[in-house]
Amino acid sequence: MTRPRAVFAMNPPDLTRALFDEDALSRLRHATDIDTDLVLTELESAESRDTLAGADILVAGWDAPVVRTAHLPYASRLRAIVYAGGVAATCLEDPGSFAARGVVAANARVANSGPVAEYTLAMILLANKRVLPAGREYRRARSHPDPFAVPSGRGNYRQTVGIVGASTVGRAVLALLRPFDLDVLLYDPTLTTEEAIGLGARPVPLDELMRSSQVISLHQPLTPDTRGQIDGERLALMRDGATLVNTARGAVVDQDALTAELRTGRIDAVLDVTDPEPPTADSDLWTLDNVVLTPHMAGSMGGELHRIGDAVADEVERFAAGLPFAHPEDLSASARARVR
């Protein structure tokens, strides 16, 4: 049986070594005809186009060169795209044209959701313990507070947590929250009541979630409908002392309204994403002591990247064996989403 020919496409080219350990590279070499030292970083040179022309599988990653309509004559053999990230269609100018030719795709969104969910869980639990203000007060007083004088609302027992968006990451967070004695609210207009309950949450309107939750964690995709969804009016609904956690996209929050609310000291925020990213040099987000600001690090990093590499190798092996992808991506749907 002839093995399909595969080629890497990503930037920088040494990203392959961050994603794939030697075991994963060996699996790719066994399942396909691939030169694991060759990585396409552009598709304009004759050499790159010749390589693309011989590929059955494109193993793409972050900042992969976009396969444009003009490249279609050079991609006549292409049958599959396996993407080491969230959306394979990001490396295609016209996903619909590839879907129409029978090209199938898979992504590693599920593999990357675990670290984001773990980061989120840690921040939710710490926020409910009010670690930020406790740390500030401890530094100020330089003495232990009376533990029985701590407000009864602090801690993770019977606290209310609101999840906005039952995305892949949102669902992973909901699963991690199950062992804890928390009242979990969920806003996602795409779900039925039964589906939300099945995820371990109580479905509520967004304004009720903002008003009722001690910690609010954002997991909605960035779309025209969700851009600025968490605006000044909704931020004003938050309880005094509540915490907003954002690992989704910075632009789902009105950044100016959030900064203004944070300046009052009334709420806290944990922001792994901002708009713009990073914040401007003069942004108060850098200096406000009720803000935890991290550099878009909730996703896979370091050794966690190997989980993505293993997931990609799994999908390539499945395709080479004639099996359907475990985590397919509908390129036709991606094309329709772009048009909308």
Image: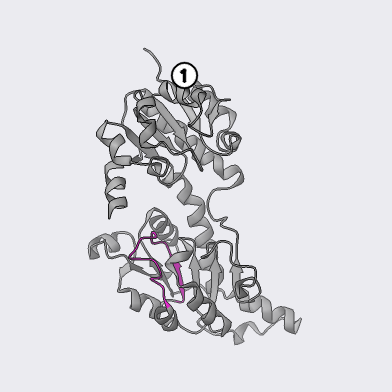
Q: Is residue 325 visible?
A: no
Where residue 153 sits in the image (x, y, percent)?
A: 50, 82
> Which quadrant of the structure image shows residue 91?
top left
Residue to which mark 1 is pinned:
33
Residue 225 on the magenta span? yes
Question: Quick check: 210 left or right of 276?
Answer: left
Residue 65 placement (x, y as % from top left): 48, 38
Please give the range of residues in magenta.
214-231
- Residue density around tag 1, few if under 14, some if 14–19, many if 20 or more, within 10 Å: some
x, y (%) of residue 99?
28, 36
**Is 194 above or below relative to 29?**
below
Q: Please, which residue is most extreme toward the bottom here?
A: 149
Residue 132 vertical position relative to residue 278 in the rendered view, above or below? below
Q: Which of the image's four quarters has the C terminus?
A: bottom left
Quadrant including the N terminus: top left
Q: Tell me: 68 left or right of 101.
A: right
Res 139 → quadrant? bottom right
In this orientation, which residue lies closer to the viewer: 44 or 92? 44
- Residue 277 colored magenta? no
Q: Is residue 130 visible?
A: yes
- Is 321 situated above or below 282? above
Magenta span: chief secondary structure: loop
- Residue located at (40% from left, 45% from top): 87
Query: In the rendering, at what x and y percent does residue 105 appear?
Result: 35, 36
Kind of residue at disc 1:
Asp
Answer with the quarter of the image where residue 122 lies: bottom right
Colour setting: one colour
The residue at 43%/30% (across/down) is: 58
